[in-house]
Amino acid sequence: QVHLVESGGGLVQAGGSLRLSCVASRSIFSINLMGWYRQAPGKQRDLVALISSGGSTNYADSVKDRFIISRDSAKNTVYLQMNSLKPEDTAVYYCNAYSFPDEYWGQGTQVTVSS
């Protein structure tokens, strides 16, 4: 079982930056994949970024070159650094942990980007 708690969301102007944090209730060292997803009102939940236990990363095309995912196993934390934010980045951002065969979600944190 893994309990995930996100923080760092808020209101920011277009072009600004935010850093989201996701703290896990246990060591993330052996968790296969951790990631960030987002869901805008009336839309499906979409992948934003993934990071493997080995440090490999994968990004949605819409956030490449603007967002950076990282993990600090010593702090059981995954981060999402979001730069050059756009109004279309507005959504609830969810942390996800996949540890075969189980999957866990955080409660989400709201990110609102004003134009």
Image (spheres, rainbow, N blue to C red):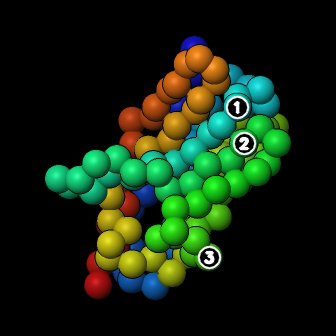
Question: What label sits on residue 90 in the rendered view?
Answer: none
- Disc 2 + disc 1, Cβ < 8 Å: yes
Q: Name the image quarter holding residue 72.
A: top right
Residue plotted at (45% across, 34% down): 106
The amino acid type of the residue labelled 2 equals: Ser
Relative side of 94 to 77, left or right: left
Q: Residue at x 39, y 35 (%)?
A: 107
Q: CA separation, marks 2 and 3?
A: 19 Å
Q: Secondary structure at mark 1?
A: loop
Q: How many marks?
A: 3
Whole-percent x and y of residue 32? 70, 31
Can you give x and y, in whole percent of width and height, for residue 51 in the image?
A: 68, 47
Report if the CB atoms under discs 3 and 1 are less than 8 Å apart: no
Determine crowd level at label 1: few under 14, some 14-19, many 20+ residues with C-alpha closer than 10 A: some
Disc 2 packing (10 Å; few <14; some 14–19; many ≥20):
some
Q: Residue at x 52, y 62 (%)?
A: 60
**Which is nearer the N-term, disc 2 or disc 1?**
1
**Could you tell me residue 29's position as x and y percent?**
79, 31
Q: Which residue is mark 2?
A: 52
In the rendered image, which residue does mark 1 sit on?
32
Above or below, 14 against 96 in this view is below
Residue 25 seen anywhere in this rendered image of the structure = no
Query: Which of the labelled discs sits on residue 65, or is there none?
Result: 3
Q: Is residue 111 left or right of residue 25?
A: left
Q: Is residue 72 visible?
A: yes
Say which amino acid is labelled 1: Asn
